Image (tube, rainbow, N blue to C red):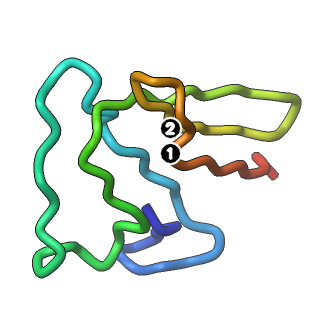
Amino acid sequence: SRLLLANREHPQGILYLGDGAWGVTPRKPNAAQKPFYLEKVISKRHFILGVLEGETQHYTAIDAEGTILDQTSRSLR
């Protein structure tokens, strides 16, 4: 998602990650109904790898073939 605070975009907001869709058939996204808070929508089976390194969080979305679909990092400070 975009960083959200009080239902609005905010640089100090919370990052929400999707469900991953690994064990189910992915939903087809509807661009006309895409909520404002979604940064990226992909209709593909994938999982999200989270790694904590010191004070930094790293998240990587990876599909069944090992392709990186998206990634982000953010500091805990």
For residue 8, above or below residue 22: below
Q: Name the residue tied to disc 2.
A: 61
Q: Is residue 25 left or right of residue 6?
A: left
Residue 14 image position (x, y, % from top left): 52, 58
CB atoms at circles 1 and 2 under 8 Å apart? yes
Residue 71 placed where, x, y %? 61, 47
Q: Residue at x 59, y 37 (%)?
A: 60
Q: Earlier in the sequence, mark 1 or mark 2?
A: 2
Quarter holding residue 1? bottom left
Label 1: few (<14), some or many (≥20) within 10 Å?
some
Residue type at mark 1 is: Leu
> Residue, x 33% and y 33% (percent of image)?
20
Q: Which residue, given by chain and number where applicable, does mark 1 sit on?
A: 69
- Give the residue at x 12% y 81%: 32
Real-space CA distance between mark 1 and mark 2, rounded to the nearest whole angstrom: 5 Å
User: In the depicted view, which residue is nearer to us: 74 or 42?
Assistant: 42
Residue 52 sits in quarter = top right
Label 2 is placed on what type of residue? Ala
Q: Is residue 7 above or below residue 65?
A: below
Image: 60 above or below 36: above
Residues 27 and 59: in front is 27
Nearest to the observer: residue 41 or residue 57: 41
Left or right of 26: which side holds 48?
right
